[in-house]
């Protein structure tokens, strides 16, 4: 294998590692962790750095998250060992004369970094990437069924969450938000509604839920999932 192939493999590994970390972050978000906390814990688990914070209790106290954390750690260990072994074999097989060979050696890794930067910084590209990964993660965890509830942040014991309506619960079909009694019955406050056209508007008394709507809601996370029929489990032993 020549130096070009080696650095191409190295660049693809960086890209793959980033995709894997984003995917596992989404898995943890589906279990109720906010995005930043989920991403930090995933990086710690994948790299095996063992960095511990009080946020790790959010994983240890939940059976589903503990199971997912074990899978993440084992995956990260196997992935790291495989990649390190592959690169050792590659570089041992290279000729020293090839190491100073061309500008492509630098351009290929820079190209991969540019791709990652585009995914992170360009809102439209990032939104598309999130939809693809979230759809894949949803099919793996929930079989592609049920509405999607992803927490955005916690305020005390309550959560701000994003609910994507893949279907509308029967009791909320064709009625206005005021008629649903959602706030009075469940304590859930619907704050914003993003329609299929991408426009986000404040929720009002006359708001009617439609397929594909994304609702920004505030309330107890377990209650949100039950109310909107997300496929979640909230047993006391979790």
Image (cartoon, rainbow, N blue to C red):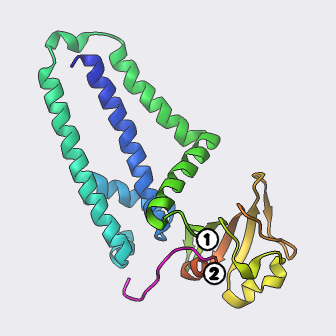
Q: Nearer the viewer, mark 2 or mark 1?
A: 2
Is 64 displayed left or right of 29 in the figure?
A: left
The residue nearer to you, when weighing 35 against 4, is 4
Residue 3, position as x, y percentages in the image: 25, 18
Up the image or down, 1 lies above or below 154; here it is: above
Q: Which residue: 58% across, 70% down?
A: 146
The label on residue 160 is 1
Is 153 displayed left or right of 186 in the figure?
A: left
The magenta region covers 229-238
Residue 145, position as x, y percentages in the image: 55, 67
Q: Secondary structure at mark 2?
A: helix
Q: Are marks 2 and 1 in contact (CB under 8 Å)?
A: no
User: Which residue was labeled with disc 2?
Assistant: 227
Is 85 displayed left or right of 230 in the figure?
A: left
The residue nearer to you, when weighing 56 against 136, is 136
Q: Within the magenta stretch, is there residue 70?
A: no
* Magenta part, dominant SS: loop
Residue 195, position as x, y percentages in the image: 76, 58
Q: Within the magenta stretch, is there residue 231?
A: yes
**Quarter of the image holding residue 60?**
bottom left
Up the image or down, 74 lies above or below 94; here it is: below
Q: Which residue: 21% across, 50% down?
A: 78
**Residue 49 appears in the rendering:** no
N-terminal of the pair, mark 2 or mark 1, is: 1
């Amino acid at each position: 294998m020549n130096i070009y192939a080696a650095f191409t493999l190295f660049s693809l590994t960086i890209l793959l590692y980033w995709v894997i970390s984003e995917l596992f972050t989404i898995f943890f978000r589906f279990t109720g962790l906010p995005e930043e906390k989920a991403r930090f814990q995933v990086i710690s688990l994948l790299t095996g750095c063992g960095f511990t914070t009080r946020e790790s209790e959010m994983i240890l106290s939940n059976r589903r998250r503990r199971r997912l954390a074990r899978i993440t750690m084992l995956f990260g260990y196997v992935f790291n060992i495989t990649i390190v072994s592959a690169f050792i074999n590659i570089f041992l097989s290279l000729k020293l004369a090839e190491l100073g060979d061309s500008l492509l050696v630098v351009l290929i890794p820079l190209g991969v970094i540019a791709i990652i930067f585009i995914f992170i910084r360009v809102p439209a590209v990032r939104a598309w990437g999130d939809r693809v990964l979230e759809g894949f993660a949803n099919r793996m965890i929930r079989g592609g069924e049920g509405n999607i509830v992803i927490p955005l942040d916690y305020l005390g014991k309550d959560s701000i969450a994003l609910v994507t309506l893949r279907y509308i619960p029967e009791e909320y079909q064709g009625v206005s938000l005021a008629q649903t009694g959602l706030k009075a019955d469940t304590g859930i406050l619907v704050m914003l509604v993003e329609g299929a056209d991408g426009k986000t508007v404040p929720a009002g008394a006359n708001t009617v839920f439609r397929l594909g709507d994304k609702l920004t809601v505030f309330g107890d996370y377990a209650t949100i999932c039950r109310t909107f029929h997300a496929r979640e489990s909230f047993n006391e032993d979790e």
